[in-house]
Amino acid sequence: NNDYSGNLPSGTTTMNGMLVFNFNQYDYATVSKVIAGSSTGRLIKTNMNLVTLSAANTFTGAVSVVQGTLLAGNAAALGKTNIGTTIS
């Protein structure tokens, strides 16, 4: 989805591969949809902007922040993070 406002498709987004947040059009974006998926998926935040995850996400894959800021707007925003969270 190339919606630079942070809008994912309606319903729950299932992340079984790589989900990259690389919004270069805006200084910030809020993702309010639930992100689910197995440990084979990986959420990656790139670019120098701010992305807020505001839903109670249920994915179990890794979270990586390569650049910018990833804000957890919910206690479960980073999913179950069974594999871990990396900030580089």
Image (cartoon, grey):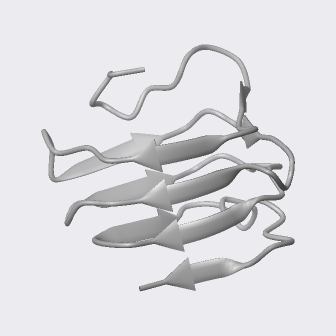
From this viewpoint, which residue is outermost toward the top? 10
- To which quarter of the image does residue 12 belong? top right
Q: Quadrant of the N terminus?
A: top left
Q: Where is residue 3 shown, x and y percent of the image?
A: 32, 22
Residue at x 15% of width, y 53% of height: 27
Q: Quadrant of the C terminus?
A: bottom left
Q: Where is residue 22 shown, x and y percent of the image?
A: 31, 47
- Horizontally, is 77 left or right of 39 in the view? left
75 is higher (above) or lower (below) than 19: below
Q: Where is residue 87 shown, x and y percent of the image?
A: 48, 84
- To which quarter of the image does residue 82 belong? bottom right
- Horizontally, is 37 left or right of 3 in the view? right
55 or 38, nearer to the observer: 38
48 or 18, nearer to the observer: 18
32 is higher (above) or lower (below) than 47: above
- Horizontally, is 3 left or right of 34 in the view? left
